[in-house]
Amino acid sequence: MPVTVISPEQALEMQASGHLLIDVREPDEWASGIAEGAKPVSKGELQAQACHHLASLDQPVVLICAGGKRSDACAAELSRQGYTNLFSVSGGTQAWMAAGLPVAPYRATDFDRRYARQMILPNVGREGQQKLIKARVLLVGAGGLGSPCAYYLAAAGVGHLILVDDDRVDLSNLQRQILHKNSNVGELKVTSAKSTLNDLNPSISVEVHADRITEANINNYINNIDLVIDGTDNFKARYAISDACAQRGIPWVYGAVHRFEGQVSLFHASVPESRGLCYRCLFPEPMNAVDAPNCTEAGVLGVAPGVVGVLQATEALKYLLGIGESLSGRLLHIDLLSMAVHDTVMSPDPDCPCCGPNEVQRCRAPSP
């Protein structure tokens, strides 16, 4: 259905008669003033979440932008979605102001300004951003993987981050652990991390614990948690995370690096629901430390944990938002020297000692 283009004066008359006027510019543009009574909703958000702003497909809606082109394009897209009573203001806000029509000041909230570029994304919007604000994520490790992962989760607005790490910042960490600075050497990593993350985004809550995750204490940290992220480099902690999450049905994001390579996946086993595939499905028992040396022993390219940590953050955000295709059931492998990326399809092990139908008691984490 063709979009009707109207003058600013006609738009004002329609608004006076009760029609909805929507300013589809960006938040930084609204700061210069908006047509009085207009509802500020960016073009991207309106197109992606029209049903949250428009009462029905036939509701009369007048769209206005800066000069008229974006409102025309937005109206065309809404028309394609089935909306039938659309109007676009010729010349936009510029013409509105030039005609001397009433303009109101707009004061964007810190929330709107901080997350503006994220909320215009399809399938995110204000509703998705609110999901992130309400999310509680446990991040085990504030080192090579935990640094970039925590940094981007904080920037994205994940509302409550819990960081657990008992190590202190060493000069050798700074080549890859971007949460920490030279002035933090000798300080607890969680203390340094909290300072950096609060400085980046003071609107979120960062809870820290100077502790090492074990089978004995993992349940102290996973109550009321939406997601766990493994940023460790030791197998005891990883198996403790996997076993406890499987017993409680909590998803967790796995990441590992070795020299120039990295792996990422998402595990979401649930013993109560008989939903399989945990870390023990792949590796029933921890490897010998000699066969799997850590960064201190084998070395690591500084950007390798950065790449993997960012991928872990991506998986976390996708899960929390409920968008995209996760790595659940797939193990992603990246070789930075060749830039070769491939994934391996994984299947649950029916004989898994933790999440299989005959799981054994020794793999159950202690009750809280």
Image (spheres, grey):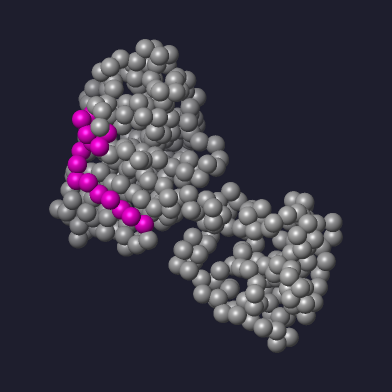
Residue located 31% across and 60% down the image: 198
Which image quadrant is residue 5 in? bottom right
Q: Quadrant of the C terminus?
A: top left
Residue 148 in view here: no
Residue located 31% across and 53% down the image: 206
Q: How many marks?
A: 0
- Asked if the stretch drawn in magenta spans residue 214, the answer is yes
Residue 125 in view here: yes
Q: Nearer the viewer, residue 11 or 349?
A: 11
Tell me where the magenta segment starts and ends, as one range.
204-220
Residue located 52% across and 41% down the image: 322
Left or right of residue 188: residue 255: right
Eyeballing the image, is 152 above or below 96?
above
Q: Quadrant of the N terminus?
A: bottom right
Which image quadrant is residue 261 in? top left
Q: Nearer the viewer, residue 266 or 127?
A: 127
Q: Residue 249: give x, y in percent of width and height.
A: 40, 30
Left or right of residue 243: residue 184: left
